[in-house]
Image (cartoon, rainbow, N blue to C red):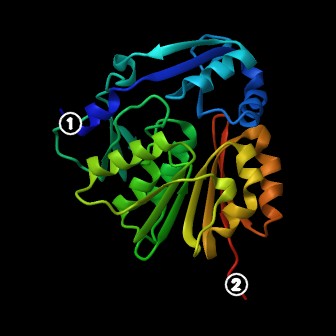
Amino acid sequence: MSRRSKTSVRRVWGWRRLIAMTQQELWNERLLAVQAPPWVMTERPNRSRILLEVYTEDHGAVLSLVERFGGSVRVVRDSEWLVPEKSVPLRIGKRLEIVHSNISRRATMPRLQIPYGMAFGSGDHGTTGMLLRALTQYEDWPGTSVLDLGTGSGVLALTARLFGARKIEATDFDADAIRVARENEELNFPEPMIRWQCADVKRLKVKAGFNLVTANLFSEILCQAAPQITASVASGGQLWLSGILRSQKPQVVTTYRMQRLRLVRAVSRGKWVMLQWSKPLAV
C-alpha cells in the first residue's frame, strides 16, 4: 500500500448547509469570527443557493458549527475523500499542464500532478487559476525567492519550483493542507526543496523578504494581515493577492495602498479579482 493511500484512511467529518447566493461575504465573516476549519463554497448549476462545507478531523469543531449555525454533520466515507479522478488535464495557456491522475502520455509542456482532494484545491478554481496564469508569464525565475501564503494543495509553490525558483517557502493555517502539499511535492519531484510551514498569516514573521509573494486568501484575512504580508516582500519585489470578490476590491486596494505598495495590475475572472503589487526599492 502506498503512503498516499495509508494517509487517506482516517476519520474525517463534514459539516454542510445551504446559504443564499448574496450571503457569501456574511458567512466568510461568521466563520472567521469563530475560527472555523477551512471551508468551501460551491455554486451549483441552476440552483439559487450555495453549498457551504467544512471538512476536518476535529469532531468537536463540526459539532460547534451545528450548535451555532445549524446544518448537518456526517462522517465522510473514504470513497468520497478519494474523489474520482478526471482524465482531462487543466492547461494554463501553453506553459503549464496540471493532471489529476497518473497520465502515461508524453508531456508536451511543463506538467504537475495534483490529485483531487476535498478542500485544498487543484488549480481549477478561478482565484488559483489567475495566479497560475501569472506564474506562467513571470520570466525572472533564476534567483527568485517565493513565499506562498494559504498554499492549500501547494500547487502555486510547486509551479514556482517547476519553473526554477531558487528558494520557496509555503504556509497554511491548516496542518492537513501542509501534509497534502508535502505529499504533492514528493509526487512530482525526486527530492524535497520547498519549506512547508503550518502558520497563521496574521502572525507571520520572515527573516528576509521574498522577491515574489503570492497570497490566495479571503479578503478579510488579506486586510487584517496587510502589515505582515507587506513586510514579507523584498524591496523591489512583487505581491500577488487573490481570493478577492469584486465588491471587496476597493477595500483591499485602499488597505495595501496604505502599506505604500504600487498597484501594477488588476485581473478579473467572473466575480473574482487578482491584484498585482510592487514594493518600491528602498532608498
Q: Nearer the viewer, mark 1 or mark 2?
A: 1
Whether residue 261 is situated above or below residue 7 in the rendered picture: below
Q: Quadrant of residue 227?
A: bottom right
Residue lying furthest bottom: 283
| 85 relative position to 27: left or right | left
In the image, what residue occupies the spot 34% across and 17% down? 79
Secondary structure under tag 1 reads: loop
Residue 217: x, y in percent? Answer: 63, 45
Residue 103: x, y in percent? Answer: 21, 37
Q: Give the number of marks.
A: 2
- The residue labelled by disc 1 is 2
Whether residue 244 is situated above or below residue 67 in the rendered picture: below
Q: Quadrant of residue 24?
A: top right
Which amino acid is tagged 2? Ala
In the image, what residue occupies the spot 66% across and 14% down? 18
In the image, what residue occupies the spot 69% across and 65% down? 230
Alpha carbon distance from label 1 to label 2: 49 Å
In the image, what residue occupies the spot 63% across and 10% down? 47
Residue 258: x, y in percent? Answer: 83, 64
Which amino acid is tagged 1? Ser
Whether residue 278 is situated above or below residue 91 in the rendered picture: below
Q: Which mark is residue 282?
A: 2
Q: Which of 115/179 is in front?
A: 179
Quadrant of the drawing holding the C terminus: bottom right
Q: Look at the image and tell me whether residue 244 can be seen.
A: yes
Secondary structure under tag 2 reads: loop
